[in-house]
Amino acid sequence: MTVYPKTLTIVKLGLINICAITSALSMPSGQSQLNHVDRIIVVGKIIIDEYGQQSEGRSVSIGGGGPQSAFGAAAALAAWSGNTSDPPKKQPVTFVGAVGEDWMETDTKTLNGMLGAALHSIELIKGPGLKTPRIQLWHDKDQTIEWKALNESMGPAGAEALWVDRPSAKEMLSIIGEDQQVSCHVDLEGGANAPGNGDDIKFLRHDEVQKHIAFLSAEPVAFPDKSGFLSKGDAESVVSRLGYVSSALKLISPDEAIYKSIDSTFWNNYEVAIRMGSKGSLIRCGDSSKTIPAATLDTYNGEPVNPTGAGNAYSGAIAALRSRGVPIEKSALFASAIGAIFCEHDHIPPWTADVIEKVRRVAADLEKRFQE
């Protein structure tokens, strides 16, 4: 049995380890460990998504970007490795996210059904007395995602407090394990008034955590105004919050609104993968840039079934492959394929050999178009 500090317990539920601050002393034995740098830890948000208007009937799923990024990372690794088993093998990916006290066993089972077959492990950090964020989602005629918070769960009783220092440095170190090097991909709330007030990735400012991270990538999150640009305050906030971890940061995957709202010279110090939806993506390294075409969707009308989470999946995928040293153009082709396949499903695609093989086919088709 592995003994942890008094303030941390990890309670194992099936394939999911739920972390919570308590006075317990230890973790049940038997949890498998990965002892190599190939492991990637995806730290992201969990939000309960309710789709559609009340009058139309709503469907409920687990979103927030974190689960989608983790699946994208796993799918990219499986596709790149040439894995042909059915179902595909679990990938060395750990997902870490915070949930409220209202998180239920049925939610655990749902998340496990989405990710359990694909990932090495899932770590949920519980916030005592807090709400799991919940939003209503819908898409306008241009497939732009619109949303509104429900039950004040994005406020002080929910995301504003839940997304502060979760995971903590102590929790991250226990998840990483002793003397291990890992890659890490995070989503970062970047807006000036974003929930968490910039402390959602506070653990990355801890020297001991930084020692264990061999490769770090980030997907900043901020929302444009009606002009299509971020406000000046939000743009400055994104730059400031990325600057918290600039010494370790290798890759940033902003959306187009964030990218064009920030002075071009800021991006020169990083590899940048700009997500542009139906226009594809732009890969930038210093002053050099290349456009990756968008994939043609395999749907009855060529339109997305549900674009929610496709950008997160792209970010997780390109981060996973770059952490392995795959060239950035190749990484972007596989990430674009995974993002497109996300758009063809209502929610996260199934973890099947057919899906992974389709990632390879779509990436190969994109490569031909990229080289034309």
Image (tube, rainbow, N blue to C red):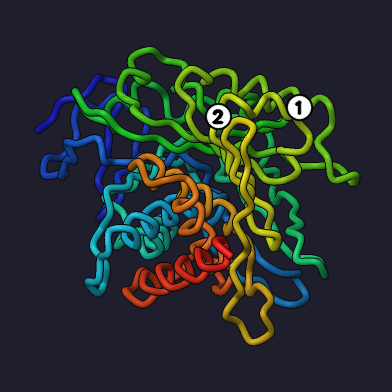
Q: What residue is pinned by disc 2?
A: 270
Residue at 60 percent across and 56 percent down: it is 292
**Is residue 103 something one can see in this rendering?**
no
Characterize the local packing of mark 2: few (<14), some (14-19) or many (20 or more) Cα atoms within 10 angstroms. Answer: some
Characterize the local packing of mark 1: few (<14), some (14-19) or many (20 or more) Cα atoms within 10 angstroms. Answer: few
Q: In which quarter of the image is the N terminus?
A: top left
Question: Which amino acid type corresponds to the residue marked 2 in the rendered image?
Answer: Tyr
Does residue 339 appear to the left or right of 20 in the view shown? right
In the depicted view, which residue is nearer to us: 87 or 18?
87
**Is residue 230 something one can see in this rendering?**
yes
Does residue 131 appear to the left or right of 302 in the view shown? left
Q: Where is residue 245 in the image (x, y as percent from the top left)?
A: 51, 20
Q: Given the current orientation, which residue lies at the most extreme bottom position? A: 300
Q: Where is residue 239 in the image (x, y as percent from the top left)?
A: 67, 24
Residue at 25 percent across and 71 percent down: it is 84
Q: Position of residue 31 (x, y in %)?
A: 16, 44
In the depicted view, which residue is nearer to us: 30 or 348?
348
Residue at 40 percent across and 73 percent down: it is 355
Where 25 sits versus 51, above or below? above
Residue at 51 percent across and 68 percent down: it is 368
Q: Distance between the residues labelled 1 and 2?
A: 14 Å
**Quadrant in the picture for residue 155:** top right
Where 110 sits versus 291, above or below? below
Does residue 206 appear to the left or right of 300 in the view shown? left
**Quadrant in the picture for residue 369:** bottom right
**Quadrant in the picture for residue 272:** top right
Whichever of labels 1 and 2 marks the residue nearer the N terminus, that label is 1
Q: Where is residue 59 in the image (x, y as percent from the top left)?
A: 61, 71
Q: Which mark is residue 263?
A: 1
Where 298 sits versus 274, above or below? below
Where 77 sits versus 55, above or below? above
